[in-house]
Amino acid sequence: MIQLDNVNVYYGESHILRNVSFEIPEGQALCLMGRNGVGKTTLLKTIMGLLSPRTGRVSFGGQDITRETPERRVDRGIAYVPQGREIFPYLTVEENLRLGYESSGSPWRAGLGRSVFEEVFELFPKLPQVLGRAGGVLSGGEQQQLAIGRALLGKPRLLLLDEPTEGIQPSIVMEIQRVIQSFKNQRRFAILLVEQYMEFAATLADTYIIMSKGSIVSAGQTSELSEEHVKQYLIV
Ligand SMILES: Nc1ncnc2c1ncn2[C@@H]1O[C@H](COP(=O)(O)OP(=O)(O)OP(=O)(O)O)[C@@H](O)[C@H]1O
Ligand SMILES: [Mg+2]
């Protein structure tokens, strides 16, 4: 569904992503791991179209999207939950959700688009209880649920998640794991998950890649992933 071929990305003269190639078939989740600063967020931004590769190709559903705008990619069904859960702190939960829905390119129906909202409320039962609250006063875990719920409103075909468990307590991590799992089971779509928490990654993802200094240094099935193997690349 999503495929990268020899992607090279620079910030000015800094060569960040080096010949990155991989594919995520429909229905699968891939976990991307690597130390701080190896280029994980840069990779997600490149897939979203917020950064342009100097060379290489990004394909989605068999079509070359390398030069397409982020808006066009949203229309195609790519959704991005950025690192640090970037919700609008001064807007209410409902306003955050509505904005997510409108900007997803989904046709805005009369009223609230209830049924679409209800699907997300079923996944995150906490959200309908806090609709009138400002996003900024929610707990970190609630903000992450809002950010993921907002991304799911547009019924994406590819979900990009940047460290969804960062700084979140275990019970909410389980909640998020459950939601992503059920979403994965009921829909034919792909997930690219950046994650350092190995258990979470191994539960949700089918395959993994590990990056070091902008290159892929290890790849395979998560069922074959061992703590020792990950440590070798993740600990300095
Ligand atoms: N806007 C920018 N301009 C210049 N360099 C940048 C910019 N954003 C990131 N970098 C650099 O690019 C490299 C990769 O950054 P990136 O954010 O992709 O890493 P990461 O793997 O997501 O790290 P983390 O685990 O800390 O989130 C880092 O060295 C970073 O300092
Ligand atoms: Mg990052």
Image: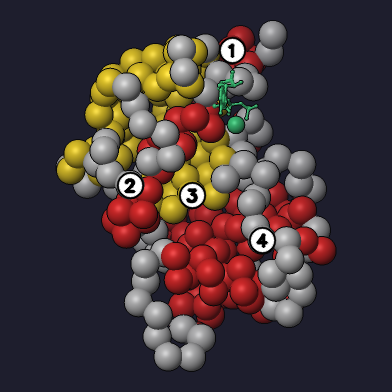
Identity of the residue drawn at 69% across and 8% down: 236
Closest to the observer, 28 or 225: 28
* Label 4 SS: loop
Judge from the rendering whether residue 173 lies leftward or rightward of residue 29; answer left or right.
Answer: right
* Label 3 SS: strand
Q: Which residue matches tag 4?
A: 88
Q: Amino acid at mark 2?
A: Thr
Which of the two discs, 4 and 3, sits closer to the camera?
Answer: 4
Q: Is residue 183 visible?
A: yes
Q: Position of residue 116 (x, y in %)?
A: 46, 77
Q: Which residue matches tag 1?
A: 233
Circle 3 residues within 10 Å: few <14, some 14–19, many ≥20: many
- In which image quadrant can residue 191 be found? top left
Question: Is the CB–ligand 2 distance for label 3 below 8 Å?
Answer: no
Q: Amino acid at mark 4?
A: Phe
Q: Which residue matches tag 2?
A: 69
Residue 80's tag is: 3
Q: Is residue 218 visible?
A: no
Which of the two discs, 1 and 2, sits closer to the camera?
Answer: 2
Q: Position of residue 64 (x, y in %)?
A: 19, 39
Circle 1 residues within 10 Å: few <14, some 14–19, many ≥20: some
Circle 2 residues within 10 Å: few <14, some 14–19, many ≥20: some
Q: Is residue 123 above or below residue 69?
A: below
Judge from the rendering whether residue 229 lies leftward or rightward of residue 214; answer left or right.
Answer: right
* Residues marked 2 and 3 touching at CB (< 8 Å): no
Q: Amino acid at mark 1?
A: Tyr
* Label 1 SS: helix
Which of the two discs, 2 and 3, sits closer to the camera?
Answer: 2
* Label 2 SS: loop
Q: Position of residue 83 (x, y in %)?
A: 62, 41
